[in-house]
Image (spheres, rainbow, N blue to C red):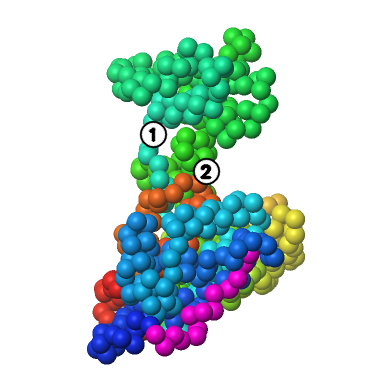
Amino acid sequence: MFRENKEHLQGNLFNSLYGMDSRLAQKLQNSWAALFYEHVFCQIDECLFAPLYSNDNGRPNFPVNIFMGLDLIKEIREYTDEVLLDEFAFNYQISFALGLRTLGERYFAPRTLYEFRARLYHYSLEHPEEADLIYAQFEKLTDHFINVARLTTDEVRMDSTLIMSNIKLAGRLSLTYDVLVQGIKVLPENLLKDSLKIFLKSDYKTHLLYQLKGKDILSRIQSLINHCAEVLQQVEEHPELKTETEILRLERFLKEQAAFSEEEKRWIAKGSREISSKSLQSAYDADATYRNKNGKKHVGYALNLSETCADENPVQIVTHYNLAPNTTSDIELLKTSLPNLSEHGIKDVYTDGGYYSPDMTEEAQAQGIKVHYTDMTGRKTSSQKLHYSDFEIKNNQKVLRCPANQEPIRTAFDEKEKTLSAHFNREICEQCPKKENCRVKFQKKDTVLRVSQKALYAEETRLKIEDRGLRKEATSKRAAIEGTNSALKRAHGAGKLNVRGIIKCKLVVGAKIIAHNFRQLNRFLKGYDRRKLPKSNQGIPVAI
């Protein structure tokens, strides 16, 4: 049964703090623990987690704010679970951060913490249409941090980075073997043939995978695929086995890695280039995808961050994040983030060229957001031609004048195709000194300019990028988020997480980002102000 924890709000006369030397007590009050208690622990909204428990039945839950606080302290202090539990039991500073004023005041079995995490995971799994609870908590704490530090939030910078779950980069042969063995282990003893039992031997993987020549790999993969098909054939008459996770994974793997030949009546391994990057990459993480970025192979997920970047802010914090398969493009990540950015009143977004798309620029503008790029993808236009901006165009829909100040005979806008056109007097155009470089095309009776809105948006963006002043400003605003990505990976271990699956990864990443934001707030409350530092030092994090 769910119950909020309010006991920490009522003082206890007989607690460890009152018997402490005044100098140590003062030092404790000035430490990170006191700031954590005030700005994190007291701000945790336990009611968000009420759906994890029964409304009117069972024993009252262990305080959710203590469990949430412990998971955040784990990320802040870089503890393992074993160290975290010991610190909770014997470290008074940790107890103080969690609203406990007497050491050993609360006890719980480690399993209780693991069950809380399991409840959180299963709730997220069963309610995919709702925002995960950690993200909802992140938003509440972020709003509080923003108010305390009085940060300006209408400008953000955005970037994505690649992260891994707790898996190894497996070759195709190793992956096939692991998927097969998992499927075999599901089979009951009476369905296990001798041809399958051999894969359960502890040393067989080493013999099969590593004691062979490179030219034999494809034939070995084909042999394993044959055994995968054999496992599926064994469960065909056992519906209760078909729904097992390992069997479903094996079936998915077979369809992705092989094609069924009607002529030969068997599954034949596909060539490496025929396999989608969205195919199964790990027998232990069905959500991880493959990506080759800048010549580096990566298996896992893409983490997209939005961070404040106003010059007047003493510190900057992450205001939005999103985790997706690493095959998701930056454009798609931006599109997913736009509703959240618009809802929070963001006016300007600074990012790199990977996020550029004419459609995305138009959609952002429709939501009142201006995207500033440090570069952009696509082919550059000829420098010899006049810019479309040299024409006087109203709302990117109506041409009013050409660069030589000639008004069009007629102008029109195609709503369906999103293109505009303007017809000019051919005789005037023939006498124009700019005709060699003009965008109009000569026809029998007149000249015509036809251009899509996409091209107008693209040129507008490219001209801004080519403007040194605007580009320098955009680059300056965006650059520091690279340091934020690095800090999350180095200080919080976000480069390779200790969990698997996109849902668990989202929950852990959320805790790590909250921990990062608290570190930023802690810096601010201890007197740090990035505006007073040389620009080269403004992104260097300070340990707490």
Query: Where is residue 422 shown, x and y percent of the image?
Result: 69, 62
Is residue 220 one of those drawn in magenta? no
311 with respect to 121 (left or right):
left
* 257 to 5, vertically: above or below: above
> Where's the C terminus, which quadrant?
bottom left
Residue 491 location (% of width, % of height): 32, 62
Query: Reading the chain from its start, which is encountered first: label 2 or label 1?
Result: 1
Task: Report, in whole angstroms, how far the alpha carbon at label 2 lies from the one at label 1.
Answer: 15 Å
Residue depicted at x 60% and y 63%? 59
Crowdedness of circle 2 by 10 Å Cα count: few (<14), some, many (20+)?
A: many
Q: Which mark identifies residue 170?
A: 1
Q: Is residue 87 visible?
A: yes
- Whether residue 210 sits left or right of residue 431 in the image: it is left
Whether residue 38 sits left or right of residue 215 in the image: it is right
Q: Residue at x 31, y 82 (%)?
A: 28
The residue under label 2 is: 287
Say which element carries label 1.
Answer: loop
Task: Please rate how many residues cluster around mark 1, counting C-alpha atoms within 10 Å: few if below 14, some from 14 to 19, many from 20.
Answer: some
Magenta span: 1-14
Which picture quadrant has residue 139?
Answer: bottom right
Front residue (pair 205, 155): 205
User: Which quadrant of the rendered structure holds the N terminus?
Assistant: bottom right
Position of 412 relative to 443 (above/below): below
**Is label 2 in a helix, a strand or a loop?**
loop
Is 7 colored magenta in this rendering?
Answer: yes
Amino acid type at mark 2: Asp
